[in-house]
Amino acid sequence: MLLAKALLNCTVIHEINDVSNDKLNVNNAAKYLKQMNKTTSHTNGVLGIIFLAQQVNPEIGSYQEHFLNEQFNFTVKLTNGTIYMTLEDAQDYEARPSSVTSDRYQNIAKTFKKL
């Protein structure tokens, strides 16, 4: 149970509900958690894109931290859930914010998972 609570705090709960009847698969959860690394790279890009995504979906919470996941993209922990974006999205926003089109940040907003 403690592991499940810790995983919930890391906001990977939606990634580990792969067992029928929404039972927590602790082994898969621990495996997934080990694959993510907390990072501070491209924080300005992540924050900028979250701001844009919040304009699309006001339910998206505030940034807390972000992780580099196994696909080498970002899983972002928010005050009330998670959101995903590619490394390229964050890099593009940092280099030239106008290069992140409304289609891109609308799609990112759709990845929001509320806890």
Image: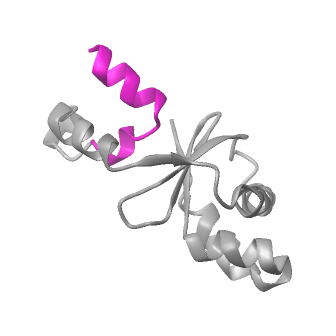
Q: Please give left or right for residue 3 compared with residue 61 in the image.
A: left
Q: Is residue 59 shown above or below 24? A: below
Residue lying farthest to the top in this orientation: 2
Quadrant assignment for the N terminus: top left
Q: Give the residue at x 80% y 56%.
A: 51
Tell me which colouring the rendered structure shows: one colour
Q: Position of residue 58 (x, y in %)?
A: 76, 49
Residue in front for this viewpoint, 70 or 60: 70
Query: Which quadrant of the view contains residue 52?
Result: bottom right
What range is drawn magenta here? Answer: 1-16
Q: Position of residue 13 (x, y in %)?
A: 37, 38
User: What secondary structure do most residues of the magenta stretch adopt?
Assistant: helix
Q: Please give left or right for residue 3 compared with residue 6 in the image.
A: left
Q: Please give left or right for residue 95 compared with residue 108 in the image.
A: right
Q: Is residue 51 shown above or below 33? A: below
Q: Give the residue at x 46% y 37%.
A: 11
Q: Position of residue 61 (x, y in %)?
A: 70, 41
Residue in front for this viewpoint, 14 or 88: 88
Q: Is residue 52 shown above or below 3? A: below
Q: Give the residue at x 37% y 44%.
A: 14
Is residue 51 inside the magenta stretch?
Answer: no
Q: Please give left or right for residue 26 compared with residue 53 in the image.
A: left
Give the total of numbered labels: 0
Is residue 8 inside the magenta stretch?
Answer: yes
Residue in front for this viewpoint, 45 or 61: 45
Q: Give the residue at x 64% y 62%.
A: 109
